[in-house]
Structures are given as structure tokens and as C-alpha cells.
Amino acid sequence: KQEVTQIPAALSVPEGENLVLNCSFTDSAIYNLQWFRQDPGKGLTSLLLIQSSQREQTSGRLNASLDKSSGRSTLYIAASQPGDSATYLCAVMDNDMRFGAGTRLTVKP
Amino acid sequence: EPEVTQTPSHQVTQMGQEVILRCVPISNHLYFYWYRQILGQKVEFLVSFYNNEISEKSEIFDDQFSVERPDGSNFTLKIRSTKLEDSAMYFCASSLLTSDETQYFGPGTRLLVL
């Protein structure tokens, strides 16, 4: 059974710092990996989707990488801003989508 | 920008009652999903739906649950005989053509079973 783990569980950084969020999964037979943002009490906003054949995807200040063979993905956020404060979830798709518990990010002004 | 909508935003029900959660997926999307998130826990997949039938379902999605696309726009999740442990946020999502594309989530329905 696929297990998805995210480290760290929480992270607090000063504004302007670059940061990396980590995601690992136990079964490398995935179709894709998706990073989401979740604001408190709200739905999920898709940030980036990486297909299994891809190594990375970029959108603005966000860059996500995928190493399927080692079961790892990272989400890199450049020049963090207070508005980036949220919980970041990674999810892998095999027959269904499995989520990690998330990393709660706080960016302090 | 098109988005997935869900109604109601909040629902309170008594244990044993039936609830129907409603979703309007993005109009040209073909795959629909339901997920739930119990407070403080991971988002969990419940079911995917394509071409008017269930495509995949998790072990959570037992006989208590059912899904339906009653018309061309709505997608519903019915929970029969609700239990206290059904209290959660329920999210609907949709994707365009296949199940391995970006999934777009609705804002969720917070269900509280008393």
C-alpha cells in the first residue's frame, strides 16, 4: 500500500528565504505527483503536477522535482512571502490519489 | 476561471440520517472524484467516476456511500445512516480527460454528525 510522507511537518521562515519541502513515497509505480496548497478551512489548490516521465516542473517561484526511482519529490519555493503561508500537500497518483499529511509553512514578515 | 463548486458549505445532521453532498465539476471535465479529510488527518480518496460509473473506489467507500450524476452538471455523494466518524470535510474534484491529469478541487463541505 502506497504511503506518502512529508517532512518537515511544520516550517517557519523569515520573508525572503528560499526553502525546500520534502515528500517521499513508498511505491515508485506512480502515474504522477501533484503538489497542492491548502489554506485553513479551505479547499486544495493545485500548484504543480509532475508526470512520472518528467523530472521537474516550474511555475513562477515554485519548482518541483521528482525522483521516481528513489521515491522522492521536493518543492522549492524561492524568495518566500507572507502570502505563501499555508499547508503544502503532496499527492501521488497510482490507482487512486494518496496524500501526505502536509507541511505547514509560516513565512514571517 | 472555471472552478468546482460544492453545496452546502456546512451541513449538520443527526446520527443515522442520510445526507447528500452536491458538487458541480468544471463543465468540460470528464473525471470526477470525492475525497474526505477528517479534522487533523490526511486527505483520503473515496471514489472516482467516469462515463457514468465508478472507476475506482477506496476501502472507505463501502455500501454506506453512493455517487450519482443525476444530470449534466451535478455530481453527488450520498451518505446513508451517518455515523459520528463520518464528520469530516468532503472535497469534490474534477479533471479534464484522464485520471492522471491535474485535479481541480472544490472548496469542500464540512459535515458534522451529532
Image: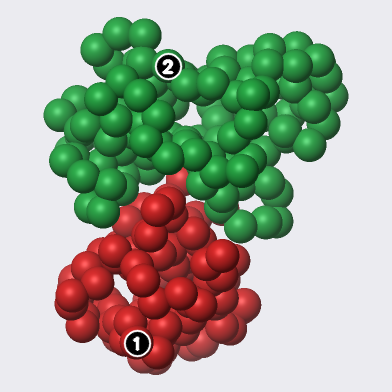
Chain colours: A red, B green
Q: Residues within 10 Å of mark 1 (few under 14, many from 20)?
A: few
Residue in front for this viewpoint, B86 or A106: B86
Q: Label 1, on which residue? A: A69
Name the one closer to the observer, A24 or B110: A24
| Chain at numbered mark 2 | B
Against A16, residue A91 (above or below) is above
Give me the residue at 24% from left, 12% from top: B72
Residue B106 rendering spot, x and y as whole percentages: 40, 37
Q: Nearer the viewer, residue A84 or B37?
A: B37
Viewer-side label of 2, 1? 1
Q: Residue B20, how many percent across, how many down? A: 56, 15
Q: Position of residue A7 (x, y in %)?
A: 56, 83
Residue at the image position 36 percent from the left and 31 percent from the top: B49
Disc 2 designates what residue?
B68
Residue B58 figure quarter: top right
Q: Which mark is residue A52?
A: none
Chain of the residue under label 1 = A
For mark 2, give the secondary structure: strand
